[in-house]
Image (cartoon, coloured by chain):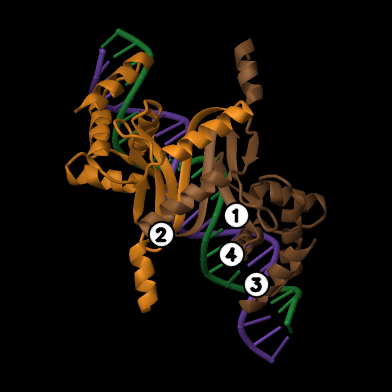
Chain colours: A orange, B brown, C green, D purple
Amino acid sequence: MENYNRKFSEYLKNKGLKFTPERKNVMEEVFSIHKHFNIDELYDRLRKQGKHISRATIYRILPLLINSGLIQSTFRCQDMINYEHIFGHKHHDHLVCVKCGKIIEFKNEKIEKLQKAICKKYGFKEIEHKLGIKGYCRVCLAKMKNGT
Amino acid sequence: MENYNRKFSEYLKNKGLKFTPERKNVMEEVFSIHKHFNIDELYDRLRKQGKHISRATIYRILPLLINSGLIQSTFRCQDMINYEHIFGHKHHDHLVCVKCGKIIEFKNEKIEKLQKAICKKYGFKEIEHKLGIKGYCRVCLAKMKNGT
DNA sequence: CTAAATGCAAATGCTTTGCAATTCC
DNA sequence: GGAATTGCAAAGCATTTGCATTTAG
């Protein structure tokens, strides 16, 4: 259940980096958030639990979490980068409602396969891919039909 | 051939906005660039042709070009937003080489259809979607095998 | 012990904005 | 003529960085 712990500590050890309390706290917080988050949300959540970690430190820890494969950035929202934890989760893509901000995750094997075929065609070695669809969700559509 | 001209001027008229020389110049420059570009490149290209348009103005014109459907933002690269003109072009997606920065465009009808089906399933009305695949291009892969 | 990490405050760099002067319609 | 637009310089703001201090291993 806490395999991300091992994964992160091993990553750090390999790089000759330290597994500090700050890094542990950020890591755990990230895995306690079951949605997309940005730096501010992360900072505030930590703070509410008495974990006063500076923004600079969080900014320095996020790349470590990304490079160790625990999280990924998803998209920008209001000029801030959003993240989500991915370790232990299957790859998925997103529908993003531009009205209410809701995010719907979906998986589609067929699309994945087609993407692989495309990469092969171009002799391209994929590192990662992101598919995001922006639009209006069911709820917002209904509201708009009523007239807000 | 210059239908974007009409499209843009009509968009501006509808909004009660003016079709100034600056707006015309930026529009034309954007359609003379047949690749992805960022603000700096656009600014420099205009300047080289004696079109001294301030960055502030360009920043103010870009949203107009986006909202009129002439261009779209694609992705961030070195912390700058990249754009491409889309008017008169079919939708396509991108392979981005993280090593050399090369961008390969591709179209895939099957993926498009699958996306539509997904939207339908969730009662989601799409505005736009973006599929980006990051990785290493054929050339960079070959170089890496040789040892740079 | 000592290289790495932290926090703070200052710096960076893209983007936005206030405002006076100018221009399109 | 008057609202819209432009350019400039200043402001905003997310993110990064220098540096003195602290800490993990």
Q: Is residue A104 left or right of residue B53?
A: left
The residue at 30%/39% (across/down) is A54
Q: Amino acid at mark 2?
A: Phe
Q: Which of the two labelled residues, at mark 1 and mark 2, occupies the earlier sequence position? A: 1
Alpha carbon separation for disc pair 4 and 1? 9 Å
Q: Secondary structure at mark 3?
A: helix
Q: Amino acid at mark 3?
A: Tyr
Residue B14 position, x and y percent, is 63, 78
Residue C21 position, x and y percent, is 71, 73
Q: Amino acid at mark 1?
A: Gln
The C terminus of chain A - image quarter:
bottom left
Alpha carbon separation for disc pair 3 and 1? 16 Å
Confirm whether circles 4 and 2 share one chain. yes
Q: Which residue is mark 3?
A: B11
Tell me if residue B9 comes above or below residue D13 in the rendering: below
Q: Amino acid at mark 4?
A: Asn
Contact between marks 3 and 2 (CB within 8 A): the answer is no
Tell me if residue A49 comes above or below residue A17 in the rendering: below
Q: Give the number of the disc on residue B136.
A: none
Contact between marks 3 and 4 (CB within 8 A): the answer is yes
